[in-house]
Amino acid sequence: MADYRAGDVIRLTRNAVGMSQEELCDGICSVQTLSHIEHNKHRIKPDTYRQLMEKMGRGVHNNCAVCMGKDMSLLEEYPLFEDAMAKRDYHVAERYLTRIREKISDYVTDRQYLKRVESILAYNMGTIGVQEHMQQLGEALAMTIPDYECYLRDGKRDIVFPYREQEILILMEIGNTYYAMCDMDEAIRVYETIIRSLDAGYMDVKNAEELKLITLANLARPLGKLGRYEEALAKASEGLKMAVSCGYAHALVELLMGVAGNRLKLTKTMEDSEMQKQELREIKRMMRQAYYIAAARKDAYNRKLINENLRYHFGDEM
């Protein structure tokens, strides 16, 4: 669960919807009070926060990615489901999701979470197609941001909208789906939108860093597909540095392979054969390191993928 700085959320939302301080605070508080709130100099009362957010068309929802549901046992099943999804063990994930459905509450954020993960699971199991998956993700995001599309279009691309953690996860999957549809420009646009939001500083540092490093790993993929290898390498390297500092093992595998893959592409432009050999040795070392991390996590999917890369590029495997 992420924590948010209320003043920053109000300021960023107000700017995004195009309201002045005078328009927003009318009938709620003074302009001076609102200014102090927006600069985190004034402790805001829950009722004032609710009124300000509702006036901007932004309801005050529970900020958890998923709530406890009808009893505390959901806290045990939620991480097990997420772990199965991360390892692409979809049949196991389906069993946990069945239990989550039975226990989850009817809060809008819980229904939003459920719609997101149900669509991701169904898409990965092949029971729905890419277009239906995209539609369901849009419907999930619209539960809390009915006009979300306007913040993704060219006219408002530079506006920073303070998405909550759950909304960022939906946006991330929208970007992944564009990538699967081979629409690299749209995927890049969505990932860059997420990063602008996370860089705004309204979310606690730890959660923002974890979400950003995953987004950087995702962003490196379409950049690489478009042949923008140096940009892709820079994004993957930035994410890798963050992942190491955060100890985020799952992202480490993706980011190590992202760095290795883009460095591999760039070795083809090297004229110095000795430098090329040294670089290839380092790339192979990184792939092997990624394999060991995947093995420690019992991640069979990535172990197989890394071995395929080692065989193809180096005639070797673990």
Image (cartoon, helix red, strand yellow):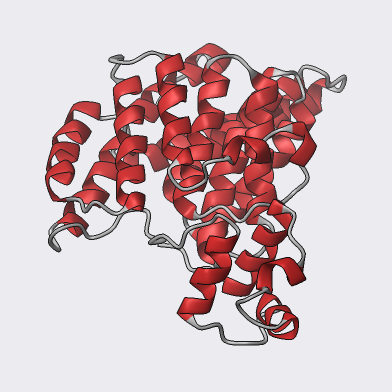
Q: Can residue 208 be seen in this view?
A: yes
Q: Quadrant of the C terminus?
A: top left
Q: Position of residue 79 (x, y in %)?
A: 26, 51
Q: Where is residue 38 in the image (x, y as percent from the top left)?
A: 69, 75
Question: Dividing the picture into quarters, in which one does residue 11 lie?
Answer: bottom right
Question: Dividing the picture into quarters, in which one does residue 284 lie?
Answer: top right
Say left or right for 1 vs 152. Answer: left
- The foreground one among 109 and 87 is 109
Q: Which residue is drawn at 70% across and 49% down?
A: 196
Q: Which residue is drawn at 77% across and 33% down?
A: 154
Q: Residue at x 48, y 31 (%)?
A: 138
Say left or right for 194 vs 308. Answer: right
Q: Can residue 205 be seen in this view?
A: no
Instruction: Give the vertical position of 12 relative to 271 (above or below).
Output: below
Q: Which residue is drawn at 12% across and 61% down?
A: 71
Please give the count of numbered marks on the rendered protein.
Answer: 0
Looking at the image, which residue sits at the far front? Answer: 27
Instruction: Give the vertical position of 278 relative to 39 (above or below).
Output: above
- The foreground one among 23 and 43 is 23
- The foreground one among 64 and 76 is 64
Q: Position of residue 167 (x, y in %)?
A: 49, 46
Instruction: Give the vertical position of 138 relative to 251 (above or below).
Output: above
Q: Position of residue 117 (x, y in %)?
A: 33, 36
Q: Quadrant of the N terminus?
A: bottom left
- The foreground one among 69 and 252 is 69
